Image (cartoon, grey):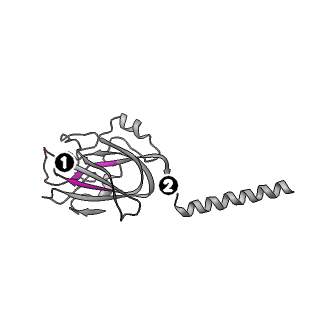
């Protein structure tokens, strides 16, 4: 979701679908550290691979919905090479309404206008479903062609116990365990 500074050009989906990367990453499946050790790069081509805020914008905000509550402990950002982000603040939420600071004052690399690598930002493992990127000082210090904020690609590293059960899931698990206990007790009594 684009909160401010958009709609701009491209879509946020194009920054989260791995389409612009030289190697694929599947959250929760691909080993994050091994993936990044391979040095995956992002293409400098725009069409279908990146998102830009409106022209002339020096700050923008976007929110990623990860689809369910996950334990996230770091993210990789391919800071778009032509515009990019000068300063980045990250915020986390489980409901999409109430956000708390995740990491503040991040300064992504000012990438050259060629295939470029990722910045990795780590933080305390946090349960979240929504990650908000508040971008400022756009474009990066040595902009290319567009006076705007831009994102090449993002990838999130999940932590241990990545899928965080909803309260209803806990209730079902407890009911199932109680049922198993009753069955075991009846078998012993018989």
Distance in Å between CA atoms under marks 2 and 1: 33 Å
Whole-percent x and y of residue 183?
Answer: 77, 58
Whole-percent x and y of residue 77?
Answer: 30, 46
**Callout 2 crowding tier (Cα within 10 Å): few <14, some 14–19, many ≥20:** some
In the rendered structure, find residue 170 and report the number of the disc placed on it. Answer: none
Quadrant where the image shows the N terminus: bottom left
The number of numbered badges drawn on the structure is 2
Q: Is residue 159 magenta?
A: no
Q: Is residue 35 left or right of 52 when viewed as pictured? A: right
Quadrant in the picture for residue 173: bottom right
In the rendered structure, find residue 86 and report the number of the disc placed on it. Answer: 1
Whole-percent x and y of residue 93?
Answer: 38, 59
Q: Is residue 50 left or right of 131 when viewed as pictured? A: left
Q: Is residue 49 left or right of 72 when viewed as pictured? A: left
Q: Is residue 146 magenta?
A: yes
The first of marks 2 and 1 along the sequence is 1
In the rendered structure, find residue 164 and report the number of the disc placed on it. Answer: 2
Examine the rendered structure and indicate whether residue 61 appears above or below residue 116.
below
Quadrant where the image shows the C terminus: bottom right
Q: Secondary structure at mark 2?
A: loop
- Magenta range: 132-154
Identify the residue at horizontal 75%, vertical 59% (top origin).
182
Q: Is residue 34 left or right of 163 when viewed as pictured? A: left
Identify the residue at horizontal 36%, vertical 34% (top origin).
37
Q: Secondary structure at mark 1?
A: loop
């Amino acid at each position: 979701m684009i909160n401010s500074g958009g709609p701009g050009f491209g879509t946020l989906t194009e920054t989260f679908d791995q389409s612009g990367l030289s190697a694929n990453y599947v959250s929760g499946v691909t080993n994050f550290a091994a993936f990044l050790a391979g040095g995956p790069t992002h293409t400098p081509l725009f069409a279908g691979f990146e998102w830009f805020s409106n022209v002339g914008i020096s700050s923008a905000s976007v929110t990623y919905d990860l689809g369910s509550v996950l334990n996230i402990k770091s993210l990789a950002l391919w800071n778009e090479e032509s515009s990019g982000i000068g300063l980045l603040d990250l915020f986390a939420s489980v409901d999409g309404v109430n956000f708390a600071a995740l990491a503040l004052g991040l300064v992504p690399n000012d990438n050259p206008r060629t295939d470029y690598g990722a910045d990795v930002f780590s933080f305390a493992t946090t349960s979240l479903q929504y990650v908000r990127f508040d971008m400022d000082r756009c474009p990066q210090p040595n902009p290319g062609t567009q006076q705007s904020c831009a994102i090449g690609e993002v990838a999130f590293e999940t932590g241990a116990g990545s899928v965080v059960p909803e309260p209803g899931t806990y209730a079902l698990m407890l009911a199932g365990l109680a049922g198993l206990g009753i069955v075991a007790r009846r078998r012993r009594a018989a």
